[in-house]
Image (cartoon, grey):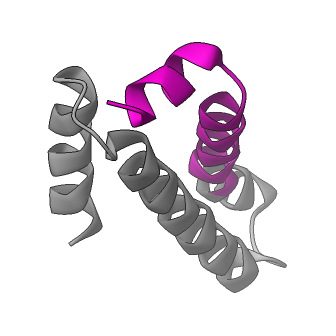
Amino acid sequence: MLAAFSICGGIGLWRARPGASKKAKVIAWGVVALSAIGAYRTYGGVAMQTLIVCIPGVIGLAVLVYFDSPKRVKATDDL
């Protein structure tokens, strides 16, 4: 489900649709949440598995920071 929503959100961003950055934020929060759940489940196991599970969460946080700061993203939301 998250993958299908990500594809739709990516197409919206590519075409600069109104509200696309808000969809991207929702997707990023979903990725962060799933990564946190996965990290919690693998914690105490192999450290490399925990690190691999955390990488998408870090990328999701980077996307959230990106979509909160630039003027261009805010301009896209105003369309």
**Residue 3: image location, x then y, percent:** 23, 58
Q: In which quarter of the image is the N terminus?
A: bottom left
Is 7 left or right of 67, judged from the image as shown?
A: left
> Taking 9 as reference, is 31 above or below it?
below
Is 71 left or right of 15, judged from the image as shown?
A: right
Residue sitting at x 84%, y 79%: 44
Is 17 left or right of 61, judged from the image as shown?
A: left
The answer to which of 64 and 75 lies nearer the viewer is 75
The region drawn magenta spans 54-79
The image quadrant of residue 7 is top left
Is 72 left or right of 4, judged from the image as shown?
A: right
Residue sitting at x 66%, y 19%: 70
The image quadrant of residue 14 is top left
**Residue 45: image location, x then y, percent:** 76, 75
> Taking 59 as reference, is 52 above or below it?
below
Q: Quadrant of the C terminus?
A: top left
The answer to which of 76 and 10 lies nearer the viewer is 76
